[in-house]
Amino acid sequence: MVNQLFSCDWGTTSFRLRLINVKDSTVLAETTAGRGIAAVYNEWVAAGLPENERMGFYKRIIQKHIDLLQTGSLPNIPVIISGMGSSSIGITELPYGEIPFDIAASHLPVKALNADNDCTHPILLVSGLKSTRDVMRGEETMLAGANFKREGAALFIFPGTHSKHVLVKDSLLVDTNTYMTGELFDLLTSKSILSKSVKKNETGLINSSFAEGVKEAATGNLLNVLFHVRSNQLLGNISPEANYDYLSGLVLGAELKYLPENRNKLYLVCSDGLADRYILAIELICPGREITRIHADKALVEAHCKLAKHFL
């Protein structure tokens, strides 16, 4: 078994690399300076390189960040990559595992990539899962590393660019649904007509505006209430900063509006950045609903350590 590993979470729009002590899952160093898979894929296409050089293109990026992260000589330390690295726009596309899926790190579909001149560290690439009409890459790994009571039915919410709602029964992942919440919010605030009506609030969440958005989306039609962002500006109802949080509430309210119909135990698996918004939105839609928080970063690191102990 290896003593240390590089843990890489490479998402559509994000990148995080950590040096981990496997025995106790402690983080020794980390960086988030890299680009998400979508940006790297666009760079790959723009470079016009042949398909057989694609893996090397991505591996050189990994090596660059390892070189920047490590503070001493760490030869042969393996890298475990989960998320979009195994997707059609990633390092190399791996087939999905099938849902229903028995949640265990040792069951995750993986592929080993040998060290070479492009990356001097061996890589273990983790694939995702698919149902008959949905897919996930990355959330299944966090779920395998999460500490939760594996009895009965539970709903796991993974906020993000493409939020995942995952149904688990005992230790079996039985269904997943994707909500394009983060991507829609980004498009609306940067490229739509609504972008002129909002301004990011740098001082913190304006709870009242966010709550109003959640409630409107939870009870109304999203295609209708989205235009209220525009009319708020035209009629001078609220500030652009408040309007930004109102819009945030609208998209979260639309994602979570079905929750009163789902009475399963509820887990929220996310980093600190989104936790407050999701907890507030859930409390508004489902007053008194018990929410168990699982930190996404800790779950991912734990899963990568379990993978290292089993495969490396």
Image (cartoon, rainbow, N blue to C red):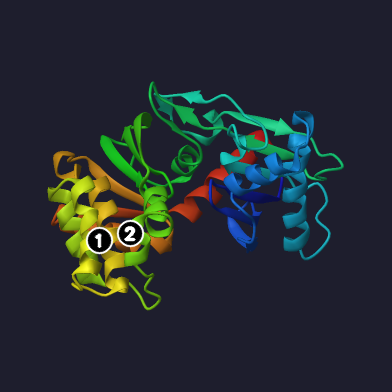
Q: Position of residue 248 (x, y in %)?
A: 30, 59
Q: Earlier in the sequence, mark 1 or mark 2?
A: 2
Residue 94 appears in view: yes
- Amino acid type of disc 1? Val
Asked if 236 appears above or below 228 in the picture, the reply is below
Q: Residue at x 48, y 34 (%)?
A: 104
Q: Check disc 1 and report its element: helix, strand or loop.
A: helix
Asked if 207 appears above or below 271 in the picture, the reply is below
- In front here: 210 or 184? 184
Q: Residue at x 71, y 45 (%)?
A: 2
Q: Quadrant of residue 166?
A: top left
Per the rendering, the mark at residue 194 is 2
Q: Check disc 2 and report its element: helix, strand or loop.
A: helix
- In front here: 46 or 116? 46
Q: Position of residue 124 (x, y in %)?
A: 67, 37
Q: Residue at x 77, y 55 (%)?
A: 64
Q: Quadrant of residue 185?
A: bottom left
Residues packed near mark 1 inside 10 Å, few (<14), some (14 to 19) or many (20 plus)? many
Residue extending furthest toward the front: 234
Residue 294 appears in view: no
- Amino acid type of disc 2? Leu
Per the rendering, the mark at residue 229 is 1
Instruction: Say if mark 1 contacts mark 2, CB within 8 Å.
Output: yes
Q: Position of residue 76 (x, y in %)?
A: 81, 46
Q: Residue at x 36, y 33 (%)?
A: 176
Residue extending furthest toward the right: 117
Quadrant containing the C terminus in the rendered view: top right
Quadrant containing the N terminus in the rendered view: top right
